[in-house]
Image (cartoon, grey):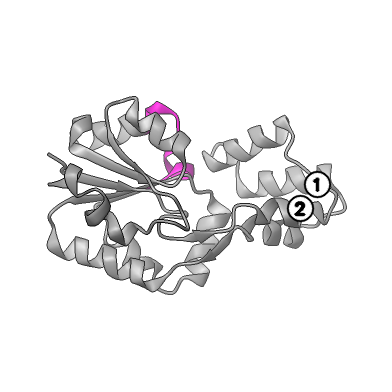
Amino acid sequence: MIKSLVFDFGDVFLTLDKSATQKNLQKFGINEFSKDMIIKNQAYEMGLISTQDIIDYYTSNFPQIDKLDFIHAWNSILIDFPPHKLDFIQRLAEEKSFQLILLSNTNELHIDWVKENISFFNAFKNCFDAFYLSHEIELRKPDQAIYQFVLDNHDLSPEQALFIDDTKENTDGASQLGIKTWHLKAGEEDVVDLFKIKRDILF
């Protein structure tokens, strides 16, 4: 029986353009992420280096880009938050039928943008019993440690949780622990249809 619904944030609630950051960095001659850049990006996403560190890394290695241009490019992936998805999670929170958990690979610059640009962010966050961001807990999907962290923190067995994420690599990682999953196809499926699409698992 499902006790907890564990939601990703980006492209589940928050609309993303995942190609935008790369496109914007190309304007400054950064045509692809090297292996070292990927390592730095992931370290930042896990909170292992600071926002100033990631800015300094890019602006020192690519002096043609300044701090503000980098931040703009970095945050260009973030688009909007459709209000009907807030309505959905608020109804779930009011019903109290499931424990609600957010589990997101989110860095500090991105969540700061969300706080500044999504007026109802606090109302959204308050719907959840737990709100886990990778840079705050120093864990990152799809590493199994992050899913085990959630199970242990909430005294859950894997079959008691349903994890919803738009990235197959992430749902595959959770599935390996026995967690029920929904690989939501962004642009084709909507989280608000959860109880239609996954009714067989939830009830």
Q: Secondary structure at mark 2?
A: helix
Q: Earlier in the sequence, mark 1 or mark 2?
A: 2
Which residue is found at the position 59% from the left and 58% from the top?
17
> Residue 98 location, x and y as percent?
16, 51
Quarter-wise, where is residue 192 in the image? bottom left
* Mark 2 lies on residue: 25
Does 107 lie within the magenta span? no
> Residue 76 location, x and y as percent?
64, 61
Q: Secondary structure at mark 1?
A: loop
Q: Marks 1 and 2, Cα distance to the nearest angstrom?
A: 5 Å
Nearer to the camera, 175 or 41: 175
Quarter-wise, where is residue 149 in the image? top left
* Mark 1 lies on residue: 30
Which residue is found at the position 66% from the left and 49% from the top?
52
Image quarter where the N terminus lies is top left
Looking at the picture, which amino acid does disc 2 mark?
Leu
What is the crowding at mark 1: few (fewer than 14 residues within 10 Å), some, or many (at least 20)?
Answer: some
Magenta segment: 132-146
Mark 1 in CB contact with mark 2 (< 8 angstroms): yes
> Residue 173 location, x and y as percent?
40, 30
Which residue is found at the position 59% from the left and 41% from the top?
44
Quarter-wise, where is residue 176 in the image? top left
In this view, 141 is above or below 131: above
Does 133 lie within the magenta span? yes
Which residue is found at the position 76% from the left and 53% from the top?
25
Q: Is residue 85 visible to us here?
A: yes
What is the crowding at mark 2: few (fewer than 14 residues within 10 Å), some, or many (at least 20)?
Answer: some
In this view, 39 is above or below 107: above
Q: Is residue 141 visible to us here?
A: no
Looking at the picture, which amino acid does disc 1 mark?
Ile
Image side of residue 169 versus residue 49, left or right: left
Nearer to the camera, 186 or 35: 186
